[in-house]
Image (tube, rainbow, N blue to C red):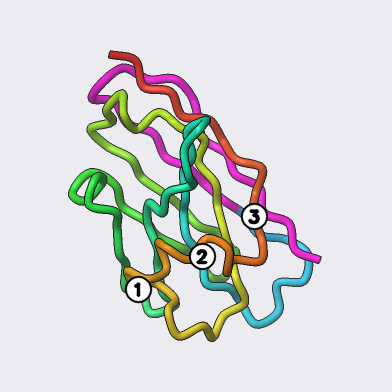
Amino acid sequence: QVQLVESGGGSVQDGGSLRLSCVASGDTRGGFCMAWFRQVPGKEREGVAAIDSDGSTNYADSVKGRFAVSQDNDKNSLYLQMNSLQPEDTAMYYCAAVRAGTYWCGAVLALTLAPRYGYWGHGTQVTVAS
């Protein structure tokens, strides 16, 4: 079993910053391919940022230049630095993981394959006030 736990969400003003963290525990042997998704009630889950084991990253167009994803493989941790936050960034943010070795890990495709991630956290709420 694998557990993902997110933290770092909260409420900020327009233009503010937050840093999300996600820690994987349990059977972490072999490592993971990880990504951040977000969801607003009534809408589909949206891929935000993905990262490969070599550090290559991809982002949704709506967050490019404002968000930065990073990881610490030794700590089985994933991070999302969010700057210049906007009210439209308000959502529940989820950490997702799939066992390492997937060919699409970190690629743009990784942002569209939510059903292929086998492990999900419970989410952390981000609210940006205008």
Q: Which residue bears the numbered disc 2?
A: 34
Name the residue at 31% across, 17% down.
13
Q: Earlier in the sequence, mark 3 or mark 2?
A: 2
Q: Which residue bears the numbered disc 1?
A: 107
Q: CA distance from mark 3 to mark 1?
A: 19 Å
Q: Check disc 2 and give the amino acid type.
A: Met
Picture quadrant where residue 120 is located: bottom right
Q: Which residues are magenta?
A: 1-22
Q: CA distance from mark 2 to mark 1?
A: 11 Å
Q: Give coordinates of residue 11: x percent, y percent.
A: 44, 20
Q: Quadrant of the C terminus?
A: top left
Q: Is residue 83 left or right of residue 102?
A: left
Q: Nearer the viewer, mark 2 or mark 1?
A: 1
Q: Are marks 3 and 1 in contact (CB under 8 Å)?
A: no
Q: CA distance from mark 3 to mark 2?
A: 10 Å
Q: Earlier in the sequence, mark 2 or mark 1?
A: 2
Q: Are marks 2 and 1 in contact (CB under 8 Å)?
A: no
Picture quadrant where residue 31 is located: bottom right
Q: Residues within 10 Å of mark 3 (few under 14, many from 20)?
A: many
Q: Quadrant of the N terminus?
A: bottom right
Q: Check disc 1 and give the amino acid type.
A: Ala
Secondary structure state at the residue bearing disc 1: loop
**Does residue 55 sit above or below 46 in this rendering?**
below
Name the residue at 32% across, 69% down.
108
Taking the magenta stretch, the answer to whether it contains residue 21 is: yes
Name the residue at 31% across, 23% down.
87
**Does residue 68 sit above or below 19 in this rendering?**
below
**Does residue 115 sit above or below 84 in this rendering?**
below
Q: Check disc 3 and give the amino acid type.
A: Trp
Secondary structure state at the residue bearing disc 2: strand
Q: Which residue bears the numbered disc 3?
A: 120
Q: Camera-side residue: 46 or 126?
A: 46
